[in-house]
Amino acid sequence: MDKYIDASALGQVLLASIIGGVGLVALFALGLRGLSAAQEGGRSSGYVVAGGSFAVVLAGIGLGLYAILAA
Amino acid sequence: MDANTLLLITVVVTALAFDFTNGFHDTANAMATSIATGALSPKIAVALSGALNFIGAFLSLSVAATIAKGIVDGSSITLTVVFAGLLGGIVWNLLTWYFGLPSSSSHALIGGVVGAAFIAGGADAVLVDGLISKVLIPALLAPVVAIGIATAGTYAVYRLTNGISDRHRDTGFRIGQIGTASLVSLAHGTNDAQKTMGIITLALIANKTQGQDDGTPFWVIFACATAIALGTYIGGWRVIRTLGKGLVEITPPQGFAAEGSSTAVILASTHFGFPLSTTQVCTGSIIGSGVGKRLAQVRWGLFGRMAAAWVVTLPAAAAVGAVAYAVANGIGGTTGVAVVFVLGLIFIGGIYQLSRKAPVDHTNVNAEWTGSVAPEPVPAGV
Protein backbone atom coordinates (compact mmCIF):
# COMPACT_ATOMS: atom_id res chain seq x y z
CA MET A 1 0.00 0.00 0.00
CA ASP A 2 2.96 2.28 0.74
CA LYS A 3 3.93 2.62 -2.87
CA TYR A 4 0.44 3.72 -3.77
CA ILE A 5 -0.33 6.16 -1.01
CA ASP A 6 1.92 8.78 0.50
CA ALA A 7 0.43 8.37 3.96
CA SER A 8 2.28 11.23 5.57
CA ALA A 9 1.25 13.74 2.91
CA LEU A 10 -2.31 12.51 3.14
CA GLY A 11 -2.23 12.90 6.91
CA GLN A 12 -1.04 16.47 6.58
CA VAL A 13 -3.76 17.22 4.05
CA LEU A 14 -6.39 15.84 6.42
CA LEU A 15 -5.10 17.82 9.37
CA ALA A 16 -4.86 21.09 7.45
CA SER A 17 -8.30 20.49 5.92
CA ILE A 18 -9.86 19.97 9.32
CA ILE A 19 -8.25 23.09 10.73
CA GLY A 20 -9.29 25.19 7.77
CA GLY A 21 -12.41 23.50 6.49
CA VAL A 22 -14.00 22.87 9.88
CA GLY A 23 -12.11 25.10 12.31
CA LEU A 24 -12.05 28.37 10.41
CA VAL A 25 -15.56 27.73 9.06
CA ALA A 26 -16.86 27.24 12.60
CA LEU A 27 -15.02 30.34 13.79
CA PHE A 28 -16.75 32.41 11.12
CA ALA A 29 -20.08 31.06 12.34
CA LEU A 30 -19.06 31.96 15.88
CA GLY A 31 -18.31 35.46 14.68
CA LEU A 32 -21.77 35.75 13.18
CA ARG A 33 -23.26 34.50 16.44
CA GLY A 34 -21.32 37.15 18.33
CA LEU A 35 -22.50 39.86 15.94
CA SER A 36 -26.08 38.75 16.34
CA ALA A 37 -25.80 38.67 20.14
CA ALA A 38 -24.46 42.21 20.06
CA GLN A 39 -26.87 43.68 17.50
CA GLU A 40 -30.08 41.87 18.42
CA GLY A 41 -29.38 40.90 22.01
CA GLY A 42 -27.65 44.11 22.99
CA ARG A 43 -24.68 42.35 24.54
CA SER A 44 -21.64 44.29 23.44
CA SER A 45 -19.31 41.42 24.35
CA GLY A 46 -20.65 39.94 21.14
CA TYR A 47 -18.62 42.48 19.18
CA VAL A 48 -15.46 41.26 20.88
CA VAL A 49 -16.26 37.65 20.05
CA ALA A 50 -17.11 38.63 16.48
CA GLY A 51 -14.03 40.77 16.01
CA GLY A 52 -11.74 38.13 17.44
CA SER A 53 -13.26 35.32 15.43
CA PHE A 54 -13.18 37.18 12.12
CA ALA A 55 -9.62 38.30 12.78
CA VAL A 56 -8.49 34.72 13.30
CA VAL A 57 -10.34 33.62 10.17
CA LEU A 58 -8.64 36.31 8.09
CA ALA A 59 -5.28 35.44 9.60
CA GLY A 60 -5.86 31.80 8.82
CA ILE A 61 -6.72 32.59 5.21
CA GLY A 62 -3.67 34.82 4.93
CA LEU A 63 -1.46 32.10 6.34
CA GLY A 64 -2.91 29.51 4.00
CA LEU A 65 -2.46 31.70 0.94
CA TYR A 66 1.08 32.60 1.96
CA ALA A 67 1.96 28.95 2.45
CA ILE A 68 0.77 28.15 -1.06
CA LEU A 69 2.21 31.11 -2.89
CA ALA A 70 5.56 31.15 -1.14
CA ALA A 71 6.15 27.49 -1.95
CA MET B 1 5.97 28.08 -42.79
CA ASP B 2 7.37 24.60 -42.40
CA ALA B 3 5.47 21.54 -41.29
CA ASN B 4 7.02 21.48 -37.83
CA THR B 5 5.99 25.03 -37.06
CA LEU B 6 2.48 24.31 -38.24
CA LEU B 7 2.35 21.27 -35.98
CA LEU B 8 3.60 23.32 -33.06
CA ILE B 9 0.99 26.01 -33.67
CA THR B 10 -1.74 23.38 -33.88
CA VAL B 11 -0.64 21.90 -30.56
CA VAL B 12 -0.54 25.33 -28.92
CA VAL B 13 -4.00 26.25 -30.23
CA THR B 14 -5.40 22.89 -29.11
CA ALA B 15 -3.81 23.30 -25.69
CA LEU B 16 -5.37 26.73 -25.27
CA ALA B 17 -8.71 25.26 -26.37
CA PHE B 18 -8.37 22.63 -23.67
CA ASP B 19 -7.53 25.37 -21.18
CA PHE B 20 -10.71 27.18 -22.24
CA THR B 21 -12.85 24.07 -21.68
CA ASN B 22 -11.10 23.57 -18.33
CA GLY B 23 -12.24 27.09 -17.48
CA PHE B 24 -15.92 26.78 -18.21
CA HIS B 25 -16.14 23.29 -16.84
CA ASP B 26 -14.79 24.36 -13.47
CA THR B 27 -16.61 27.68 -12.93
CA ALA B 28 -19.25 25.65 -11.15
CA ASN B 29 -16.80 24.40 -8.55
CA ALA B 30 -16.28 27.84 -7.13
CA MET B 31 -19.50 29.63 -8.00
CA ALA B 32 -22.40 27.18 -8.18
CA THR B 33 -23.21 27.47 -4.49
CA SER B 34 -23.00 31.27 -4.51
CA ILE B 35 -25.21 31.55 -7.57
CA ALA B 36 -27.72 29.10 -6.13
CA THR B 37 -28.15 31.05 -2.89
CA GLY B 38 -28.10 34.47 -4.50
CA ALA B 39 -24.91 35.50 -2.74
CA LEU B 40 -23.71 36.60 -6.16
CA SER B 41 -25.72 37.24 -9.28
CA PRO B 42 -24.84 34.82 -12.10
CA LYS B 43 -23.03 37.31 -14.32
CA ILE B 44 -21.07 38.88 -11.48
CA ALA B 45 -20.14 35.45 -10.17
CA VAL B 46 -18.59 34.31 -13.44
CA ALA B 47 -16.88 37.65 -13.95
CA LEU B 48 -15.35 37.50 -10.47
CA SER B 49 -14.31 33.91 -10.96
CA GLY B 50 -12.78 34.74 -14.32
CA ALA B 51 -10.78 37.63 -12.90
CA LEU B 52 -9.50 35.58 -9.99
CA ASN B 53 -8.57 32.66 -12.23
CA PHE B 54 -6.61 35.12 -14.38
CA ILE B 55 -4.75 36.48 -11.36
CA GLY B 56 -4.24 33.02 -9.92
CA ALA B 57 -2.64 31.81 -13.11
CA PHE B 58 0.09 34.42 -12.74
CA LEU B 59 0.69 33.46 -9.15
CA SER B 60 1.66 29.90 -9.98
CA LEU B 61 5.39 30.16 -10.38
CA SER B 62 6.48 26.54 -10.60
CA VAL B 63 5.39 25.30 -13.99
CA ALA B 64 6.46 21.77 -14.75
CA ALA B 65 7.18 21.14 -18.42
CA THR B 66 5.87 17.65 -18.10
CA ILE B 67 2.62 15.93 -18.71
CA ALA B 68 1.31 12.82 -17.02
CA LYS B 69 4.62 12.51 -15.25
CA GLY B 70 4.99 9.13 -13.61
CA ILE B 71 1.93 7.90 -15.45
CA VAL B 72 3.21 7.84 -19.00
CA ASP B 73 6.77 7.07 -19.99
CA GLY B 74 8.43 10.33 -21.05
CA SER B 75 10.04 8.98 -24.17
CA SER B 76 6.65 8.13 -25.68
CA ILE B 77 5.52 11.71 -25.60
CA THR B 78 5.73 13.30 -29.03
CA LEU B 79 3.88 16.37 -30.29
CA THR B 80 1.30 14.16 -32.00
CA VAL B 81 0.72 12.24 -28.77
CA VAL B 82 0.26 15.52 -26.91
CA PHE B 83 -2.16 16.75 -29.59
CA ALA B 84 -4.22 13.55 -29.48
CA GLY B 85 -4.21 13.59 -25.69
CA LEU B 86 -5.46 17.19 -25.62
CA LEU B 87 -8.22 16.26 -28.04
CA GLY B 88 -9.26 13.38 -25.78
CA GLY B 89 -9.47 15.80 -22.89
CA ILE B 90 -11.44 18.37 -24.88
CA VAL B 91 -13.95 15.83 -26.20
CA TRP B 92 -14.62 14.42 -22.73
CA ASN B 93 -14.89 17.88 -21.21
CA LEU B 94 -17.47 18.85 -23.83
CA LEU B 95 -19.49 15.65 -23.47
CA THR B 96 -19.70 15.92 -19.70
CA TRP B 97 -20.49 19.64 -19.99
CA TYR B 98 -23.35 18.85 -22.34
CA PHE B 99 -24.83 16.45 -19.80
CA GLY B 100 -24.20 18.95 -17.02
CA LEU B 101 -21.95 16.54 -15.15
CA PRO B 102 -18.95 17.86 -13.22
CA SER B 103 -15.83 16.03 -14.30
CA SER B 104 -12.14 16.25 -13.62
CA SER B 105 -10.38 18.06 -16.46
CA SER B 106 -7.05 16.78 -15.16
CA HIS B 107 -8.12 13.17 -15.35
CA ALA B 108 -9.56 13.76 -18.80
CA LEU B 109 -6.26 15.16 -20.01
CA ILE B 110 -4.23 12.38 -18.42
CA GLY B 111 -6.65 9.86 -19.90
CA GLY B 112 -6.26 11.31 -23.37
CA VAL B 113 -2.48 11.23 -23.16
CA VAL B 114 -2.49 7.69 -21.75
CA GLY B 115 -4.65 6.52 -24.65
CA ALA B 116 -2.51 8.20 -27.27
CA ALA B 117 0.74 7.03 -25.69
CA PHE B 118 -0.62 3.50 -25.48
CA ILE B 119 -1.12 3.42 -29.23
CA ALA B 120 2.18 5.16 -29.87
CA GLY B 121 4.39 3.25 -27.48
CA GLY B 122 2.49 0.14 -26.50
CA ALA B 123 1.59 -1.06 -23.04
CA ASP B 124 5.09 -0.27 -21.79
CA ALA B 125 4.43 3.41 -22.25
CA VAL B 126 1.78 3.37 -19.53
CA LEU B 127 3.03 3.20 -15.94
CA VAL B 128 0.16 1.47 -14.16
CA ASP B 129 1.54 2.07 -10.67
CA GLY B 130 1.55 5.79 -11.35
CA LEU B 131 -1.98 5.56 -12.69
CA ILE B 132 -3.16 3.91 -9.51
CA SER B 133 -1.38 6.21 -7.08
CA LYS B 134 -1.87 9.50 -8.93
CA VAL B 135 -5.32 9.08 -10.46
CA LEU B 136 -7.32 6.16 -9.09
CA ILE B 137 -6.65 6.47 -5.39
CA PRO B 138 -6.95 10.27 -5.29
CA ALA B 139 -10.25 9.89 -7.17
CA LEU B 140 -11.52 7.65 -4.39
CA LEU B 141 -10.15 9.79 -1.59
CA ALA B 142 -11.12 13.26 -2.85
CA PRO B 143 -14.89 12.94 -2.49
CA VAL B 144 -14.59 11.00 0.78
CA VAL B 145 -12.34 13.61 2.40
CA ALA B 146 -14.44 16.48 1.06
CA ILE B 147 -17.72 14.94 2.19
CA GLY B 148 -16.26 14.38 5.65
CA ILE B 149 -14.89 17.87 6.11
CA ALA B 150 -17.97 19.61 4.71
CA THR B 151 -20.34 17.50 6.80
CA ALA B 152 -18.48 18.43 9.96
CA GLY B 153 -18.25 22.09 8.95
CA THR B 154 -21.94 22.33 8.04
CA TYR B 155 -22.99 20.65 11.26
CA ALA B 156 -20.83 23.04 13.28
CA VAL B 157 -22.17 26.05 11.40
CA TYR B 158 -25.79 25.15 12.08
CA ARG B 159 -25.16 24.33 15.74
CA LEU B 160 -23.32 27.59 16.32
CA THR B 161 -25.87 29.81 14.62
CA ASN B 162 -29.16 28.26 15.69
CA GLY B 163 -30.01 31.25 17.82
CA ILE B 164 -29.70 33.77 15.01
CA SER B 165 -32.68 34.86 12.98
CA ASP B 166 -32.76 33.29 9.53
CA ARG B 167 -32.48 36.59 7.74
CA HIS B 168 -29.34 37.69 9.59
CA ARG B 169 -27.81 34.27 9.34
CA ASP B 170 -28.37 34.07 5.60
CA THR B 171 -27.02 37.58 5.03
CA GLY B 172 -23.92 36.86 7.07
CA PHE B 173 -23.20 33.61 5.30
CA ARG B 174 -23.85 35.08 1.87
CA ILE B 175 -21.05 37.54 2.57
CA GLY B 176 -18.89 34.66 3.73
CA GLN B 177 -19.75 32.78 0.56
CA ILE B 178 -18.31 35.53 -1.58
CA GLY B 179 -15.06 35.14 0.32
CA THR B 180 -14.78 31.38 0.09
CA ALA B 181 -15.94 31.22 -3.53
CA SER B 182 -13.27 33.77 -4.40
CA LEU B 183 -10.64 31.67 -2.67
CA VAL B 184 -11.63 28.57 -4.59
CA SER B 185 -11.42 30.54 -7.85
CA LEU B 186 -7.97 31.80 -6.95
CA ALA B 187 -6.79 28.34 -5.98
CA HIS B 188 -8.19 26.98 -9.23
CA GLY B 189 -6.28 29.57 -11.24
CA THR B 190 -2.99 28.72 -9.54
CA ASN B 191 -3.58 24.99 -9.95
CA ASP B 192 -5.17 24.40 -13.31
CA ALA B 193 -3.64 26.93 -15.66
CA GLN B 194 -0.29 25.32 -14.88
CA LYS B 195 -1.33 22.15 -16.71
CA THR B 196 -1.63 23.91 -20.03
CA MET B 197 1.45 26.08 -19.42
CA GLY B 198 3.41 22.90 -18.85
CA ILE B 199 2.11 21.32 -22.02
CA ILE B 200 2.91 24.30 -24.21
CA THR B 201 6.37 24.63 -22.67
CA LEU B 202 6.92 20.95 -23.29
CA ALA B 203 5.87 21.38 -26.92
CA LEU B 204 8.28 24.30 -27.32
CA ILE B 205 11.13 22.25 -25.90
CA ALA B 206 10.25 19.23 -28.06
CA ASN B 207 10.24 21.47 -31.12
CA LYS B 208 13.61 22.86 -30.06
CA THR B 209 12.19 26.35 -30.02
CA GLN B 210 13.68 26.67 -26.57
CA GLY B 211 15.90 24.72 -24.23
CA GLN B 212 15.06 22.42 -21.36
CA ASP B 213 15.89 24.88 -18.61
CA ASP B 214 14.68 28.10 -20.19
CA GLY B 215 11.58 28.31 -18.06
CA THR B 216 8.17 29.34 -19.29
CA PRO B 217 7.94 32.28 -21.69
CA PHE B 218 5.70 35.13 -20.56
CA TRP B 219 3.41 34.83 -23.58
CA VAL B 220 2.63 31.26 -22.61
CA ILE B 221 1.65 32.30 -19.09
CA PHE B 222 -0.42 35.18 -20.43
CA ALA B 223 -2.16 33.06 -23.08
CA CYS B 224 -3.03 30.30 -20.64
CA ALA B 225 -4.23 32.77 -18.01
CA THR B 226 -6.44 34.45 -20.63
CA ALA B 227 -7.82 31.18 -21.99
CA ILE B 228 -8.83 29.81 -18.63
CA ALA B 229 -10.24 33.16 -17.49
CA LEU B 230 -12.32 33.56 -20.66
CA GLY B 231 -13.60 30.02 -20.34
CA THR B 232 -14.51 30.69 -16.73
CA TYR B 233 -16.37 33.86 -17.69
CA ILE B 234 -18.38 32.10 -20.44
CA GLY B 235 -19.51 29.96 -17.54
CA GLY B 236 -20.47 26.32 -17.86
CA TRP B 237 -24.05 27.10 -16.84
CA ARG B 238 -25.14 23.52 -17.30
CA VAL B 239 -22.67 22.27 -14.70
CA ILE B 240 -23.36 25.24 -12.43
CA ARG B 241 -27.02 24.29 -12.48
CA THR B 242 -26.35 20.67 -11.61
CA LEU B 243 -24.03 21.48 -8.72
CA GLY B 244 -26.07 24.40 -7.44
CA LYS B 245 -29.60 23.08 -7.80
CA GLY B 246 -29.47 19.43 -8.74
CA LEU B 247 -27.42 17.80 -6.01
CA VAL B 248 -28.59 19.64 -2.90
CA GLU B 249 -31.00 22.55 -2.43
CA ILE B 250 -28.31 24.83 -1.05
CA THR B 251 -28.78 27.50 1.58
CA PRO B 252 -26.16 30.16 2.45
CA PRO B 253 -24.74 28.37 5.52
CA GLN B 254 -24.35 25.20 3.49
CA GLY B 255 -22.80 27.05 0.57
CA PHE B 256 -20.31 28.73 2.88
CA ALA B 257 -19.32 25.49 4.60
CA ALA B 258 -19.05 23.67 1.28
CA GLU B 259 -16.74 26.21 -0.37
CA GLY B 260 -14.79 26.61 2.88
CA SER B 261 -14.18 22.90 2.94
CA SER B 262 -13.19 22.94 -0.73
CA THR B 263 -10.75 25.79 -0.23
CA ALA B 264 -9.06 24.06 2.68
CA VAL B 265 -8.79 20.67 1.00
CA ILE B 266 -7.60 22.05 -2.36
CA LEU B 267 -4.98 24.37 -0.86
CA ALA B 268 -3.79 21.65 1.50
CA SER B 269 -3.55 19.05 -1.23
CA THR B 270 -1.51 21.38 -3.42
CA HIS B 271 0.79 22.43 -0.62
CA PHE B 272 1.50 18.95 0.71
CA GLY B 273 1.90 17.42 -2.73
CA PHE B 274 -1.05 15.05 -2.63
CA PRO B 275 -2.94 16.12 -5.73
CA LEU B 276 -6.71 15.87 -5.57
CA SER B 277 -9.09 16.81 -8.34
CA THR B 278 -10.64 20.25 -7.74
CA THR B 279 -13.92 19.09 -9.25
CA GLN B 280 -14.20 15.95 -7.15
CA VAL B 281 -13.39 17.86 -3.97
CA CYS B 282 -15.95 20.59 -4.68
CA THR B 283 -18.66 18.09 -5.55
CA GLY B 284 -17.93 16.12 -2.38
CA SER B 285 -18.09 19.29 -0.32
CA ILE B 286 -21.51 20.17 -1.68
CA ILE B 287 -22.76 16.70 -0.81
CA GLY B 288 -21.23 16.97 2.64
CA SER B 289 -23.09 20.22 3.20
CA GLY B 290 -26.28 18.33 2.44
CA VAL B 291 -25.41 15.49 4.79
CA GLY B 292 -24.39 17.86 7.58
CA LYS B 293 -27.66 19.72 7.70
CA ARG B 294 -30.55 18.00 9.42
CA LEU B 295 -33.46 17.26 7.10
CA ALA B 296 -31.53 18.35 4.02
CA GLN B 297 -31.98 16.28 0.91
CA VAL B 298 -29.16 14.92 -1.21
CA ARG B 299 -30.04 13.54 -4.63
CA TRP B 300 -27.87 10.47 -4.34
CA GLY B 301 -29.04 9.14 -7.68
CA LEU B 302 -27.51 12.13 -9.41
CA PHE B 303 -24.30 11.69 -7.45
CA GLY B 304 -24.27 8.09 -8.57
CA ARG B 305 -24.33 9.25 -12.19
CA MET B 306 -21.51 11.68 -11.50
CA ALA B 307 -19.42 8.99 -9.80
CA ALA B 308 -19.99 6.73 -12.79
CA ALA B 309 -18.84 9.52 -15.09
CA TRP B 310 -15.71 9.97 -12.96
CA VAL B 311 -14.88 6.29 -13.16
CA VAL B 312 -15.37 6.35 -16.92
CA THR B 313 -13.40 9.58 -17.45
CA LEU B 314 -9.97 8.05 -17.80
CA PRO B 315 -10.88 5.16 -20.11
CA ALA B 316 -13.26 7.29 -22.19
CA ALA B 317 -10.75 10.08 -22.71
CA ALA B 318 -8.10 7.44 -23.37
CA ALA B 319 -10.28 5.92 -26.07
CA VAL B 320 -10.67 9.30 -27.80
CA GLY B 321 -6.96 10.01 -27.43
CA ALA B 322 -6.11 6.61 -28.84
CA VAL B 323 -8.39 7.02 -31.85
CA ALA B 324 -7.19 10.56 -32.47
CA TYR B 325 -3.59 9.41 -32.40
CA ALA B 326 -4.23 6.36 -34.56
CA VAL B 327 -5.94 8.44 -37.25
CA ALA B 328 -3.39 11.26 -37.15
CA ASN B 329 -0.48 8.87 -37.19
CA GLY B 330 -2.13 6.67 -39.77
CA ILE B 331 -2.49 9.53 -42.22
CA GLY B 332 0.95 10.63 -41.23
CA GLY B 333 2.81 13.80 -40.43
CA THR B 334 1.30 17.25 -40.10
CA THR B 335 -1.49 16.40 -42.55
CA GLY B 336 -2.74 13.72 -40.19
CA VAL B 337 -2.84 16.16 -37.30
CA ALA B 338 -4.57 18.76 -39.47
CA VAL B 339 -7.27 16.26 -40.48
CA VAL B 340 -7.95 15.23 -36.89
CA PHE B 341 -7.94 18.90 -35.89
CA VAL B 342 -10.70 19.62 -38.41
CA LEU B 343 -12.66 16.57 -37.23
CA GLY B 344 -12.34 17.95 -33.72
CA LEU B 345 -13.74 21.29 -34.84
CA ILE B 346 -16.71 19.53 -36.40
CA PHE B 347 -17.36 17.67 -33.15
CA ILE B 348 -17.14 20.88 -31.13
CA GLY B 349 -19.59 22.57 -33.49
CA GLY B 350 -21.95 19.62 -33.22
CA ILE B 351 -22.01 19.59 -29.43
CA TYR B 352 -22.52 23.34 -29.35
CA GLN B 353 -25.48 23.06 -31.73
CA LEU B 354 -27.01 20.28 -29.63
CA SER B 355 -26.67 22.37 -26.50
CA ARG B 356 -28.56 25.26 -28.10
CA LYS B 357 -31.68 23.07 -28.40
CA ALA B 358 -32.32 23.34 -24.67
CA PRO B 359 -29.95 26.05 -23.56
CA VAL B 360 -29.00 26.81 -19.99
CA ASP B 361 -27.65 30.29 -19.30
CA HIS B 362 -27.60 32.96 -16.64
CA THR B 363 -31.34 33.53 -16.96
CA ASN B 364 -32.50 30.04 -16.09
CA VAL B 365 -29.59 28.61 -14.12
CA ASN B 366 -31.54 28.91 -10.87
CA ALA B 367 -34.84 27.51 -12.10
CA GLU B 368 -36.52 24.69 -10.17
CA TRP B 369 -34.74 21.38 -10.55
CA THR B 370 -37.04 19.01 -12.36
CA GLY B 371 -34.64 16.17 -12.95
CA SER B 372 -32.85 17.34 -16.08
CA VAL B 373 -30.08 19.80 -16.72
CA ALA B 374 -32.11 22.03 -18.98
CA PRO B 375 -35.10 23.22 -16.99
CA GLU B 376 -38.52 22.62 -18.45
CA PRO B 377 -39.60 25.68 -20.39
CA VAL B 378 -42.47 27.68 -18.88
CA PRO B 379 -45.49 27.30 -21.18
CA ALA B 380 -46.46 30.50 -23.00
CA GLY B 381 -49.45 32.34 -21.59
CA VAL B 382 -48.98 31.04 -18.03
Image (cartoon, grey):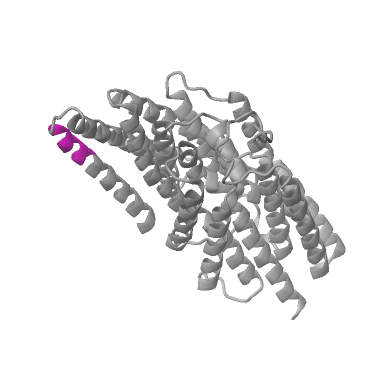
Residues drawn in magenta: A45-53
Q: Quadrant of residue A17?
A: top left
Looking at the image, residue B78 sits to the left or right of residue B168; the answer is: right
Residue B111 versus residue B361: which sits nearer the camera? B361
Residue B292, percent across and down? 43, 24
Q: Quadrant of the N terminus of chain B?
A: bottom right
Is B290 on the left-hand or right-hand side of B97? Answer: left
Q: Main secondary structure of the magenta part?
A: helix
Q: Residue B18 location, x and y as percent?
A: 64, 57
Q: Is residue B121 visible in this depiction of the protein?
A: no
Q: Is residue B189 magenta?
A: no
Image quarter hosting the C terminus of chain B: top right
- In the rendered image, residue B147, in percent from the top left (x then y), is placed at 47, 30
Q: Is residue B68 above or below residue B219?
A: above
Residue B200 in view (yes/no): yes
Determine the residue located farthest toward the right in the rendered image: B331
Q: Give yes or no for residue A52 being in the magenta stretch.
A: yes
Q: Nearer the viewer, residue B76 or A33?
A: A33
